[in-house]
Amino acid sequence: MIASADATDTFVALLRGINVGRGNRVPMAGLRALLQGLGYRDVSTLLNSGNAVFRAAGTTDADAAQAISAAVAAAHGVSVPVVVISGRRLLAAVQANPVQAADASRLLVVFAGNPAELEQLQPLHDLLSASEQFHIMPAAAYLYCPEGIAESRAAAALLGRLGRRFTTRNWATVQKIAERISSLPTAS
């Protein structure tokens, strides 16, 4: 079990659609500096796809998402959705995963700023192939495409118009983020 004693003021920022192809370029060093400039502490980024872990006191997920989105637009000229969730919610998503995926890259975990909005993804059930699984849980939703994400009608809908309000990460990335949360130094 991955856990963090200090997850109460720990947040995860997930920027949707950056550094994909040639568009929406945001260097991770720039994102770290931007988050530090907003007053967040213990800031770290993971991979090049817009994942950041940070600590902040006296803020909410929604307030942090709005501040980060505005700062990214101002600093980098990039307007992308930003989903911020608590470290506790990310760790809960890891623990609640109902899928035993043989290939972590084919399991997509879906996050929303407001987890109740995940119910809007119910139409994905109608697009599933016989081998696919889709589950909506309290902290996140999970879409497993064992035949491949590129071959999945449900994944195409999720990554397209239906999923614009959400952001997805593959299971391997979610696990790396959870490990980063757990490795944060104890707050003083």
Image (tube, helix red, strand yellow):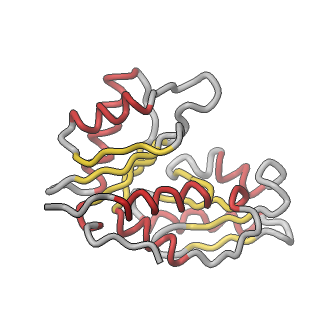
Q: Quadrant of the C terminus?
A: bottom left
Q: Is residue 111 above or below residue 65?
A: below
In the rendered image, residue 28, in percent from the top left (x then y), is placed at 43, 33
Q: Nearer the viewer, residue 70 or 86?
A: 86
Q: Residue at x 46, y 28 (%)?
A: 26
In the rendered image, residue 125, in percent from the top left (x then y), is placed at 71, 69
In the rendered image, residue 144, in percent from the top left (x then y), is placed at 72, 65
In the rendered image, residue 115, in percent from the top left (x then y), is placed at 43, 66
Query: Can you tell which quarter of the image residue 110 is in?
Result: bottom right
Q: Is residue 26 above or below residue 66?
A: above
**Could you tell me how many numbered marks the image carries?**
0
Q: Residue at x 37, y 33 (%)?
A: 31
Left or right: 134, with 188 as reference point:
right
Left or right: 133, with 8 as reference point:
right
Q: Residue at x 69, y 61 (%)?
A: 104
Left or right: 104, with 113 as reference point:
right
